[in-house]
Amino acid sequence: MANQDYHFTEIITLDACSSCSLCADVCPAVLATGDGKLSGFYRLHLLKKLQRSRSGWLAKLFKKYRMTDEELAQFGETVFKCTLCGNCQEVCPLGIRLTDIWVSLRQDLVHSSAYPRKVDMIGENISGSHNVFDEDNEERADWVDDMQDAPDDGFIKDRAEVVYFTGCVSAYFPMAQQIPIALARVFQAAGVDFTLLGEDEWCCGFPLLGAGLREMSQEVIDHNVAVIKAKGAKTIVFACPSCLQMWREYYPPEFRLTHFTEYVFDLVRAGRVPLQELPLTVTYHDPCDLGRGARVYEKPRQVIRSLPGVKLVEMTRNREKCACCGGGGNLEMIDKDLSAAIAKEKVEEALATGAEAIVTACQQCVRTMNTYVKRNKIQLEVLDITQLIERALVETEE
């Protein structure tokens, strides 16, 4: 393990922890399992011990506290059993940037060969096929073929004002492909000049962070920036909050970056989206990367409330306190049972509101919650906000 995997501010803030354990009280993995070893408090405690035993006089002083290879491997397993939801960081009274530390810790563990080998697949897939699922990247925009009203160019233009960056989950996962279809129909109805990148779109690189492979992300960053520049676009719209988060934090600031909920809010307010009555009671789940990550809380709610006939009821934990759905941090790959247990907590909270549907603004959240709902035959519809708006569009005659 090496200190160069961490920013110096991450190292110096390790000792700021007051051991209050508030992070454990909100950790979705701890709440779902009761295992305190999955908490940020426990993880930080072991990380501090590791740092002190690495070099110089501290290494000699703390030599007897060094982990064995077996203990280090076990620690690595627990570190990756985390959704990177940011709830721990949200409640930390000292403002320690815990999510950044967890990402650096994962890279540290990969460099130390103390990590679950399942995550190797992520790096292999993205470097080989340019998407996280190892699918043919030429098929990234094949979801357009399922649209009856798609234009002949398949929304892939030489130039456009706006690029819709689809993301891997929506491009390839059947349960999520209705999201880009819905977004495209809303943009068509509003007259938005947009383009897809098609096979030229590569994975944004966000899964590499969760896999501890941050250093592999520069190639995809350089590629995606180049192809969007070639389109002449100034704005990139994302329906995937994780893609948005990756672009905001790791890409050069050369474009206007906006989530669909923010972009469509302006369209609705300008009267460009023709809407009809939709009698439906919904609750809204704040995606971790859109809410705690990008601090986008109100625009999605304002959009939902603007839909005629739609009633919004809130869950007990909402906005910055919203509970994770279990779909982040590559957790499903590492421990699908834990991911499902976290999803169970989320779905039960949604059911308690009496809503007919749970609406969110993230394809991974939709996929995770919908998988749990369908497997357990629960009477609750799971929708992305793009799908909700599409359902409320005024029907036009062909």
Image (tube, rainbow, N blue to C red):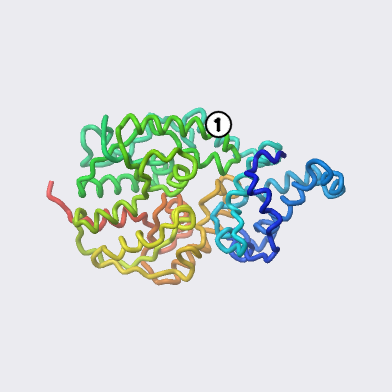
Give how far across and how far down residue 361 sits, in percent. Answer: 39, 54
Q: Residue furthest left?
A: 397
Determine whether, in the image, residue 2 is placed left or right of residue 192: right
229 versus 354 height, above or below: above
- Residue at horizontal 27 percent and vertical 29 percent from the top: 158
Determine whether, in the image, residue 55 is placed left or right of residue 98: right
Placement of the N terminus among the 4 image quadrants: top right
Residue nearest the viewer, comparing 216 with 235 = 235
Residue nearest the viewer, comparing 179 with 65 = 65
Give how far across and how far down residue 69 sits, in percent. Answer: 79, 42
| Mark 1, residue position | 124
385 versus 228 height, above or below: below
- Residue at horizontal 41 percent and vertical 49 percent from the top: 363
262 versus 140 height, above or below: below
Residue nearest the viewer, comparing 310 with 15 = 15
Disc 1 secondary structure class: helix
| Label 1 crowd bin: few (<14), some (14–19), many (20+), radius 10 Å | some
Q: Amino acid at mark 1?
A: Glu
Give how far across and how far down residue 278 sits, in percent. Answer: 24, 64
Determine whether, in the image, residue 120 is placed left or right of residue 233: right
- Residue at horizontal 13 percent and vertical 46 percent from the top: 398
Q: How many marks?
A: 1
Residue nearest the viewer, comparing 157 with 15 = 15
Location of residue 265 (image quadrant) = bottom left
Give how far across and how far down residue 91 sits, in percent. Answer: 57, 64
